[in-house]
Image (cartoon, rainbow, N blue to C red):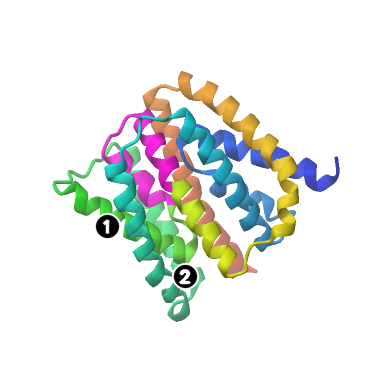
C-alpha cells in the first residue's frame, strides 16, 4: 500500500464514521485533511463519490424513518439558492463571505448549545427558506450542511429522523453535483481509482458508526452534532484568517 492509499483510508474511515452517526460531516471532516495529500479538484471528486456511497448505505439502514415532505421541498429550494450563491462569488470576495458565514455558524451553534429554540409557526415556508439558504451557502462557500442540520435540530427531531432526513437530502445533493460536474467537465475521473481505498474506508466507517449510533444517547447525539457544526464554522473562520496572515 503506497503513501497515498495509507492516507486516504483512515481519513475516509473517520469521515464516514462521523457522518454515519450524525447524518453529515463527511466533507467537513475529510476534505481539509485530504487537501494535505491531493489537489482540490481531486478532493472534491473523491468526496462526492465517497459521500454518495455512504449516504446510500445509511439510507438503506434508515428506510422508513424519513419525511419526504421535508426533504423534497428543501432540496428543490436549494437548487434555486445555488444560482445566486454562485453569482455572488463574482461580485463579492469569496473569502470574506466564507469568513462571515463561518462566524454566523459559530454564533448559531452557541445559541443551540444553550438549548435555545426558535418557535416556527409556518414550517413549510421555513423548510423552503432553509433550502434556499443551504443552496446559496453551498454555491458560494460549499458549506451547505449547517443550515439544514441546525433547522432540523431546532425542530427537535429525534436522532433517527434527524439522520434519516439529512442523509437523503445530501444524497440528492450528491447526485445533482455529479451531474453538474459531468456536464461541466470538472470531475477528475482519474482520482476515482483511489476508490479502491476509499470504499473500504466508507464500509468500515459506516459499520462502526452504526454500532456506535445505537449506543449514543439523545443528549450525546446532540452534542456530537453541535460539535461537528461548530467545527465546520471554525474551519471556515480559521482557514481565512491563516490566508490573511500569510
Q: What residue do we see at 44% from left, 45% from top?
A: 229
Q: Is residue 162 magenta?
A: yes
Q: Main secondary structure of the magenta part?
A: helix
Query: Is disc 2 placed on a helix, strand or loop?
Result: helix
Residue 85 visible in the picture: yes
In what quadrant of the picture does the N terminus appear? top right
Q: Residues within 10 Å of mark 1 (few under 14, many from 20)?
A: some
Magenta residues, start to end: 145-169
In the displayed orientation, state which residue is furthest to the left.
121
As displayed, is residue 131 above or below residue 23?
Answer: below
Q: What residue do we see at 48% from left, 31% from top?
A: 60
**Disc 2 marks which residue?**
96
Q: Is residue 40 left or right of residue 75?
A: right
- Work out how far the residue at label 1 is from the one at label 2, CA to CA, in angstroms: 23 Å
Q: Is residue 147 left or right of residue 9?
A: left
Front-lying residue, 41 or 241: 41
Residue 38 visible in the picture: no
- Residue 170 placed where, x, y %? 45, 47
| Image quarter of residue 183 | bottom right
Q: What residue do we see at 50% from left, 53% from top?
A: 175
**Disc 1 marks which residue?**
129
Amino acid at each position: 500500500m503506497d503513501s497515498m492509499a495509507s492516507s486516504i483510508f483512515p481519513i475516509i474511515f473517520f469521515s464516514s464514521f462521523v457522518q454515519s452517526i450524525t447524518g453529515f460531516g463527511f466533507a467537513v471532516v475529510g476534505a481539509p485533511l485530504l487537501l494535505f495529500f491531493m489537489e482540490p479538484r481531486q478532493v472534491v471528486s473523491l468526496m462526492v463519490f465517497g459521500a454518495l456511497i455512504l449516504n446510500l448505505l445509511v439510507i438503506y439502514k434508515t428506510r422508513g424513518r424519513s419525511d419526504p415532505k421535508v426533504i423534497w421541498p428543501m432540496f428543490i429550494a436549494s437548487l434555486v439558492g445555488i444560482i445566486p450563491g454562485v453569482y455572488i462569488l463574482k461580485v463579492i470576495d469569496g473569502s470574506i463571505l466564507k469568513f462571515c458565514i463561518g462566524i454566523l455558524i459559530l454564533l448559531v451553534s452557541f445559541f443551540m448549545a444553550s438549548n435555545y429554540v426558535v418557535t416556527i409557526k409556518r414550517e413549510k415556508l421555513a423548510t423552503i427558506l432553509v433550502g434556499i439558504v443551504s443552496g446559496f451557502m453551498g454555491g458560494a462557500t460549499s458549506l451547505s450542511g449547517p443550515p439544514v442540520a441546525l433547522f432540523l435540530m431546532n425542530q427537535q427531531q429525534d436522532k433517527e429522523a434527524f439522520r434519516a432526513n439529512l442523509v437523503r437530502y445530501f444524497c440528492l445533493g450528491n447526485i445533482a453535483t455529479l451531474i453538474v460536474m459531468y456536464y461541466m467537465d470538472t470531475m477528475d475521473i482519474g482520482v476515482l481509482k483511489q476508490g479502491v481505498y476509499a470504499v473500504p474506508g466508507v464500509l468500515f466507517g459506516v459499520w462502526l458508526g452504526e454500532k456506535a449510533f445505537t449506543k449514543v444517547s439523545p443528549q450525546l447525539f446532540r452534542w456530537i452534532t453541535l460539535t461537528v457544526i461548530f467545527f465546520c464554522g471554525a474551519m471556515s473562520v480559521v482557514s481565512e484568517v491563516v490566508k490573511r496572515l500569510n
